[in-house]
Image (tube, helix red, strand yellow):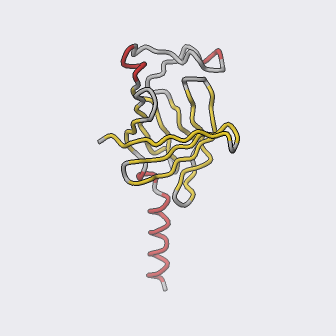
Amino acid sequence: MSMILALLAAGTAAAAAPSDVVGRWKTESRGGIVEITECGQSICGRLVSSEGLKANPALKDANNKDESLRSRPLKNMLMLKGFTRKKDEWSGGSIYNAEDGGTYKATITMQDPNRLKLKGCIVWPLCKTQTWTRIR
């Protein structure tokens, strides 16, 4: 009996581990590269590169809806945060879109070890989905 409980506990801990999505991911738009890391029991992601950042490494968050944040640099900006692991997905988090300055509810689902599906929603069903590819 104790062996079964130990196996169940180990399985639950493995399912809750954020390491499946940890790494660098290429977005579908504008050559974005996002680095996802562990943030406690959650995950978070920072923008590490994009076409815009390659052209101008000092690029600022000019489209932010909050004027006081428009002078912050886009490089290494936190854009994914607040996720909770639920079965085979990370949900309850948010994604910041620097193109329009909006923050949206987001869900991340692993498609396979090298692809994830990220869905951002203003409000369901007004959502946009992208498939990101792992960079090795």
Residue under the image location 36 percent in, 43 percent down? 134
**Of 19 and 59, which appears nearest the observer?**
59
Q: Is residue 70 left or right of residue 77?
A: right
Q: Name the spot of residue 51 as percent of width and height, x first.
A: 40, 22
Residue under the image location 50 percent in, 47 percent down? 40
Total tally of numbered discs in the picture: 0
- The correct choice, above or below, for 5 with respect to 121 in the image is below
**Of 110 and 59, which appears nearest the observer?**
110
Residue at the left extreme, as displayed? 136
- The correct choice, above or below, for 53 with respect to 3 in the image is above
Q: Name the spot of residue 59 as percent of width and height, x first.
A: 46, 15
Residue under the image location 48 percent in, 62 percent down? 15
Quadrant of residue 23 in the image? top left
**Of 18 and 33, which appears nearest the observer?**
33
- The correct choice, above or below, for 31 with respect to 25 in the image is above
Q: Is residue 10 left or right of residue 67?
A: left
Q: Look at the image and tell me in which quarter the C terminus lies.
A: top left
Residue under the image location 66 percent in, 19 percent down? 66
Q: Name the spot of residue 129 as percent of width and height, x first.
A: 54, 41
- The correct choice, above or below, for 129 with respect to 71 in the image is below
Residue at the bottom extreme, as displayed? 1
Q: Name the spot of residue 96 as percent of width and height, x first.
A: 57, 31
Q: Is residue 24 left or right of residue 88?
A: left
